[in-house]
Every structure is written in structure tokens, then in C-alpha cells.
Image (tube, rainbow, N blue to C red):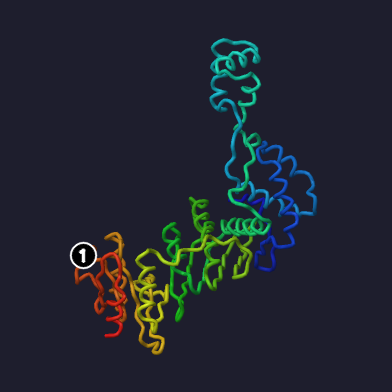
Amino acid sequence: MLPDRLLSYSVAGAFVVPHFLGEHDHPWLRALLDEHGRFVGRPQRELDARLREPMPCESPPMKLRLAVQVLTRLQRGHRTRAAVPPRRARALLFEEAARAPAPPSDVISRVAATLAVTPQDLRDSLFADLPGERLVGPPSAPMSAGALALRTNLTLVQALLLHAIAVRIDVDGGARVLVRHAKLRGLICTVTARSGSRGAVLEISGPFALFRKTQLYGRALGELVPLLAWCPHFGLHAECALHGRRLTLDLRPGDPIFPAAEPRQYDSAVEERFARDFRKLAPEWDVVREPEPILAEGTLAFPDFALQRRSDPTRRWLLEIVGFWTPDYLARKLALYRSARLSNLILCIDEDRNCADAELPPGARVVRFRRRVDPADVLRVVNA
């Protein structure tokens, strides 16, 4: 994560205002990228020395240091240029000096001869793994000034969240991806449904409120930020402890944050094929991916689809495809739906799951399938 000394923000009342990079920063960001490109393949210390000198165009010092830090992390790995692996070179020299004490130049010559390299090659290898001696690498992906600005802004927000005491994320649509990530990464959070919408509210304990593993937890929390870009509407509200003050960080749609890769629209090929086939078979029905979550047993269940008759919105079914789930996950999922007591639930169950009738939610319609869900079977249920 970003060192605190590189946090670039100001305070307005009770709010922390990140100093985001924007289009006005693109000229000096392009100059930075050009300078970085000139030093690819050369020792890092040479690039560091160049960046301590003035840039060709005016660049805010704090923002520049922040962008340099981000660009360094985006490199395609630091390489070392050494005729002999540095650790091995040092070990052999120490062993030789202890075995037959002699002037350093003689020791280096003897070890170089045994390795079939020149004494200068051996000298160059001794400290080639130090940070300043490693070779500058190109960015892991083609980089523009705009992309570097967005990535820098994302890093800044993620670093501020390391100081969070509590975080609230309010999303309308796209909640499924956030909730799944929060659970997989072990974030301490509660999730509630937003009444009358497809959204959810995540209340998350901030790393600053924990006593241990705050860096690991903070990284997991920070990973939620680029996913927000794919939510139609969101609001992130974080209470942060910064330099002895409790300040609020707010993020909204339109804030210049680098987005994550677009989440997959479907979790499996079975889901994707069903949606395509059902739309083709029943064009009078809307197939809604990720409908509103269902509150059950204090947590949320996310049905795969909602099927809604376009001419009669009261004819609406929630559909869940029970595919290659683990037995424990299946048991928890079915328990949630049983407690919700839905009267409009369709369960499409893989025949290999062998679910007993007692396990199924009361009143649920069941469609068995093998390899693919037959849309005609589902259509017969919704038209019954």
C-alpha cells in the first residue's frame, strides 16, 4: 500500500478531499511516461536520479511522487543484470576470503576464475539485486497519461481506506459482485437489502478499527473500490482517522477511479445459455439478470433471474439455477429460500444434485435438468 507520506488530500470541514489527477495533469504525466521509457533496461538508481531533477513541464511535487510510486509498481517486474546470481557471488567471495585470506582484488580474481567470468563481471554481480541496481522494466500494459491518472487516483483512495474506522457502501444494481467479493475476502460486514430496489447496503468494519492484519484487511477492502465503477449507482461513505482527526471520505459515480475488469454477466455457461434460449422462446417475457436480493435469516440471497410478463408485471417469478454447487453451499442456499417462504420461486436443479423433497423450499416449483435448462420446461411453469 501507499506510504502515508504520499497521501495527497486536503480537509474541508469534516471531509477529506483526495487530490485527484485529472486532464490538467496529463501533460506532465506524458512527460513522466516518456522519461520512464527512456530508462527501461537501465538501473533504477539512474531513473531515480533523473526524477529528482525538474520535469520538462510544471508538475505538482506531491502528485508527481505519487504517480512515480504507482508507475514503479506497474512495472513488468524488476530484473537483475548479473553474470553471477548476487547471493551466490557474495557467498563464494566470503567463503574464499575465509579459506585463504588475501587482498580483496586477489580474492575476486580467484573466484572469478573458478566461475569463468571476469573480475569486473563478478564485482557488478555483487550488489545487482539491490533496489537501485535492478533494471527498470516497462509497464505491464500499454500506459497512457489518462490511464496512469486513473490508476494513481485509485491507489490514493485505497490508501485512505487503510485509515477507515467504518465504511458504508450503498449500491443500486451490481450488488451481487460486491457481496460475493466481500464474503470471499473475509471482510467483516453486514449486508441489507434496499427496499424496493435491486441494491444493497454493505456496512463494513474499517481496518483502523481492527487490532491485527490491518494491511491484509485493508487491501481486501480496497479491492471493492474498482468494482464500484460497474454499479449503475453507488455511494461509498468512509469514516477515517487521519492525523488525530475523524474525517469523512465520500465517493460517488463520476469520481475518476480506474475501474476493475468488467465482471462476468453470467456465473456459468448454463445460465448464459438459459437466458439466451428463454428470450428467444418467450419474447413476451423479460429476463432480468440480478433482480432485487431476498432478505432471509438476516442475510441476502441473490436469485439468478427474474422472469416478468411484460404485459402483466404482477406475473413475476424468481429463478435460481442449482448447478455444480458444493453440498454445504447448496444446503445453506436452500435453507435461505425455505426461510424466505417465496411463492414465486423456480428452482432449476441439476439431476446429479439428488436433492430430497424435504430439503426444498415449500411452494417452490422445481425443474430438473441435465447439462442445460430447457426453457420450454420453465415456460410451462410460468404459464401454469
For the residue pair 349 and 275, the one nearer the viewer reads as 275
Position above or below: 6 against 335: above
- Percent across and percent down for residue 267 are 40, 64
Residue drawn where x is 62% and y is 49% of the image: 3
Residue drawn where x is 29% and y is 71% of the image: 348
Horizontally, is 203 left or right of 26 in the view? left
Q: For residue 288, which quarter of the picture? A: bottom left
Horizontally, is 52 left or right of 303 in the view? right
Residue with the most extreme bottom position: 311
Query: Which quadrant does the C terminus fall into?
Result: bottom left
Q: For residue 85, which quarter of the picture? A: top right
Horizontally, is 174 left or right of 379 in the view? right
- Percent across and percent down for residue 216 are 49, 51
The residue that mark 1 highlights is: 354
Horizontally, is 367 left or right of 168 in the view? left
Q: Amino acid at mark 1?
A: Asn
Q: Residues within 10 Å of mark 1 (few under 14, many from 20)?
A: few
Residue drawn where x is 72% and y is 48% of the image: 34
Q: For residue 180, which quarter of the picture? A: bottom left
Residue drawn where x is 67% and y is 50% of the image: 5
- Percent across and percent down for residue 242 are 63, 58
